[in-house]
Amino acid sequence: MKQRTVRITDSTGVVELHVAGASSTTLVFPLDIVPSKVLLVDTQERFFEPQANGIALVLIPKADIKAGDTVTLQVGLADGTLLPFILTSVPSEVDLKVDFELALTKKTTPESVSGLKTSIAELQGRLDECQSSSADTAASKVASLVLRQDVDKPVAFQVERHPARHLDRQAKLLVETLHVYRLFDSSYLVLTVENRDPSRAWVMERAEISATGNGSSTDAKVLATVQELASIPTGETSRLVVVYATPLQSAGQRFTLKLFEKSGSRHVQMNDLSL
């Protein structure tokens, strides 16, 4: 259990608070807290309702926050200042009480940098909430897709899966295609991307797929890309699904997959794929 003082200046980033299940953490500010401006983004309801009283705010989680989970907190003060926080659980440390000192040249408003960070954290929490219900939403979308099929077309009965193993190392990335699902007139290529660059993360901008057969080459329209990690840190591996319109099949048909890095030059091109 730890008591500490945190000084917040114009250059201070988002402050990280360490909480633990069934333990209270008290935050003390130099100004009164506006209860309506206290926003705890906790999509899995791991916290009891925050209790604001004057200059103090008490947080009590029901359980530890698991590694990788996102819980954010915004606290609004009487002068209009908004302060963003990230809540995590660290096995060796729990904040029993944190006293905050403010040394801000300008109060932190929604238009300021810290206010923007708060908005980003809030949006991330809402995204997590949307993702938590994405399975049910996806099932409904598939059902709608089934209803739209024209049973007079052969493609309406096409549902299949087959392996598409291919491994390639390029631009300090290890990319492996795994398998392809075909559902009606769309194909879903599943692959993994491992970032082996020791200096920076890798962010994909877009994917392109082209098919070659019978002496000609055509681009397959990429309908969507879904990623496990939007930004792949050093040493991490992320799964990726590239959804594309299935081109007309031909004998000996081969595919080329291109992955483009956002704001960078670490692009990948995989040739002679059997999809």
Image (cartoon, grey):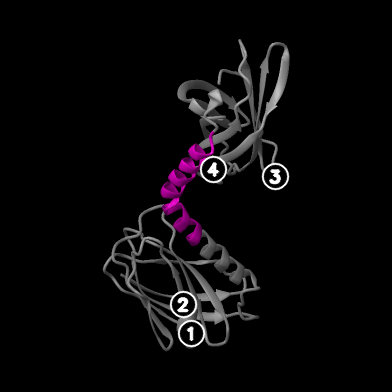
Q: CA distance from mark 2 to mark 3?
A: 36 Å
Mark 4 nearby-residue class (10 Å; few <14, some 14–19, many ≥20): many
- From the image, which quarter does the N terminus lie in? bottom left
Of the image marks 2 and 3, the number of the one nearer the N terminus: 2
Q: Secondary structure at mark 3?
A: loop
Mark 1 nearby-residue class (10 Å; few <14, some 14–19, many ≥20): some
| Residue 62 image point, x, y percent | 29, 66
Q: CA distance from mark 4 to mark 1?
A: 38 Å
Magenta span has 134? yes
Whether residues under marks 1 and 2 lie with C-beta atoms below 8 angstroms apart, the answer is yes
Report the residue marked by disc 4.
232
The quadrant in which residue 223 appears is top right
Look at the picture and state if 205 lies above or below 250: below
Mark 1 is on which residue type? Val
Report the residue marked by disc 1.
34
Whether residues under marks 4 and 1 lie with C-beta atoms below 8 angstroms apart, the answer is no
| Residue 95 image point, x, y percent | 36, 70
Look at the picture and state if 58 lies above or below 138: below
Choose mark 4 or mark 2, whichever is in front: 2
Q: Which mark is residue 135?
A: none
Q: Secondary structure at mark 1?
A: loop
Report the residue marked by disc 2.
38
Of the image marks 3 and 1, the number of the one nearer the N terminus: 1
Q: Which residues are magenta?
A: 125-149
Whether residues under marks 3 and 4 lie with C-beta atoms below 8 angstroms apart, the answer is no
Q: Main secondary structure of the magenta part?
A: helix
